[in-house]
Image (spheres, helix red, strand yellow):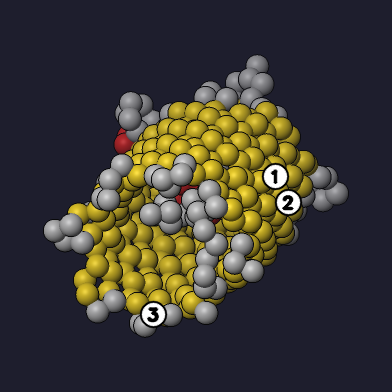
Amino acid sequence: MGDFFRKKMPTVSPGTSKVLGAALVTAALALPSLQFACAEAAPDQGVVSFKYLHYKDSQIGDGVSVITGASSAGSSSRMGVNAYSLNALVPVAGEWSIGTTYTSDSVSGASPTYHSSALTKMTDLRRAVDLEFTRYFSNGSLSFGTGYSKESDYLSRSFSLQGSLSTEDKNTTFTLGASMNSDDINPVTLPGITYKKKVYAGIAGITRVLSKDDIVQLNLGYSNGNGDFSDPYKLYDNRPSERNNTTILARWNHHIDMTDGTAKFAYRYYSDTFGIRAHTFDGEYVQPLGRGWTVSPLLRLYTQSEADFYVAVGATEKADPTKPTKPALDAVYYSEDQRMSAFGAITLGLKVSKQLNPDWLVDVKYEEYEQRSKWGLNGNGDSGLAPFGARSIQVGLSKKF
């Protein structure tokens, strides 16, 4: 049961996240910059895996829905991403493991200069390397990780330390971890100028096996960030130089004997000093079909409130989308970034995997995302924003050795 919740929490890389669109940003926003693992014993086999991800987002035409499959006349493409990832996990001496991941992603398309208007073309290439060393003990583990990510205008370095401790019966595991990210931002529009940012994060969690069919988990996270959080590619964007956030993440996995499937549920609450409050609800069902096939449909619901300094679309911009709304003259902080607004979002997905033999596994995952201001929990989003949608497909291949 130790690997039941084995999952890595992605590091939030704001340099690339800024152009990936809300579909990826909001998913990562509520996660601390840490990795979470519950493995209680060193792996007895190594694993090499390859992943390819294609992502495309767009502004959606009036009144149509990508989620419902209706015609999206009037929609316009925005950003596209092609990402490749190579991962390897190697056991060492029965007590250690070394894991490494290399990622390369290329971004091209157009991103709004303000709100959802005035699209500006852009391209970029990011390369990242992550390395993790883990020492396993009879009742726990200790991991040290480091990462390096570089793109034309962004350099990120990260370090993390995490430990887990299990009770004698292995039914309860406690986890404690910390990480640090140090980023340098060099906007191409402001040559010779470097902005810096550091984020310190911590996580504490408990995983409990309730029965042979049920396991639950609760994580509490906190991060403190200082430096430049403004987006240099937005026309009006001046954000506070400190951003702290708190997250609460609860998971419940239930195995169904009748179908041999597993239902997975998760709820995440996020709160930060920008004034954003967010809720994420996840549901996934993993169903083996025989002969190595597995199918996993998923549903994700997301909602957030707007930042305290978000500037809504004004009358002038509604009349002429080429003219941005200007913040009040006495405003200290302001942003017309769509991701700082209040909105709700729905993600539908399906993953299909095939165990080719005991060593080889192939999988394909497709997701459809749609975001609208009126879907927010309180229904008071910025009505001037254009609806936003995205599609992604991921293909993976892994081999044990």
Crowding at mark 2 (Cα within 10 Å: few <14, some 14-19, many 20+): some
Q: Residue furthest front?
A: 168
Q: Determine if residue 22 is in view.
A: no
Return the x and y of residue 219 as percentages of the image width and height. Answer: 47, 37
Amino acid on which the number 2 mark rests in the picture: Arg
Of labels 3 and 1, the one closer to you: 3
Q: Report whether 60 appears left or right of 228.
A: left
Q: Residue furthest right?
A: 192
Numbered tag placed on residue 61 in the rendering? none
Q: Cα distance, mark 2 to mark 1?
A: 6 Å
Q: Report whether 171 appears left or right of 309.
A: left
Numbered tag placed on residue 358 in the rendering? 3
Q: Say what secondary structure mark 2 lies in.
A: strand
- Please tell me which residue is depicted at 50% across the width and 28% down the height of the picture: 271
Residue 376, placed above or below residue 34: above
Q: Report whether 317 appears left or right of 189.
A: left
